[in-house]
Image (tube, rainbow, N blue to C red):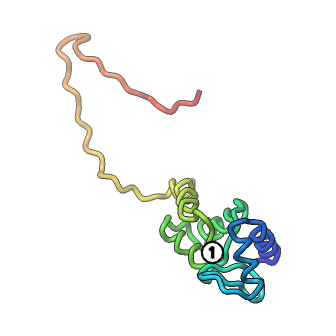
Amino acid sequence: MFSDVVDQIQRQVWQEKDYKEILKKLARGESVPDYSLEPQAKLLLFKDRVVIPSNHEIQLDILQKRHDSPLAGHPGQEKTLKLIKRDFYWAAMNQIIKDYVSSCQQCSRNKNIHHKKFGLLKPLQIPSGPWNSLSMDFITQLPL
């Protein structure tokens, strides 16, 4: 991670009430189950994963790097979740990642079609006289 992002994560994690007490205990040398401090960058770790504050910009940056980048290749929800969970942790991350991937325009355009193939068209019978049969086409999603 870049040093400016690391500094931003450090500052904002200290400001979050959920982590403030944990950080104080760790700074005093007390142990907190599942939490630790990364020695060089002094980042808060939860089960050896960097704790990300509830800052949408930082979370979005991580999501873009692990989902949208050419190296990531727009993986699906499960794979994106695994890629991010390997290194990071934040509250409600499962739902945030799910929402992000499901709203990805490129993924929805390139997604494989999983529905059954449409059936063959069936011609209508020729009516016996005028106005014996009426049909209409529905056109939807026209611009207003």
- Residue at image coords 20%, 18%: 127
In which quarter of the view is residue 4 placed?
bottom right
- Residue at image coords 29%, 52%: 116
Left or right: where 52 falls relative to 73: right
Which part of the image, by quadrant, shows the C terminus? top right
Q: Can you give x and y, in whole percent of width and height, for residue 141 in the image?
A: 50, 33
Q: Residue furthest top?
A: 130
Left or right: where 117 falls relative to 103: left
Quick check: 58 above or below 120? below
Quick check: 29 above or below 49? below
Q: Amino acid at mark 1?
A: Phe
- Residue at image coords 76%, 78%: 24
SS class, disc 1: strand
Left or right: where 121 falls relative to 83: left
Q: Residue furthest left?
A: 128
Q: Can you give x and y, in whole percent of width and height, for residue 131 in the image?
A: 26, 11
Q: Can you give x and y, in whole percent of width and height, for residue 40 in the image?
A: 77, 88
Front position in the image: 100 or 139? 100
In which quarter of the view is residue 33 placed?
bottom right
Q: Which residue is mark 1?
A: 88
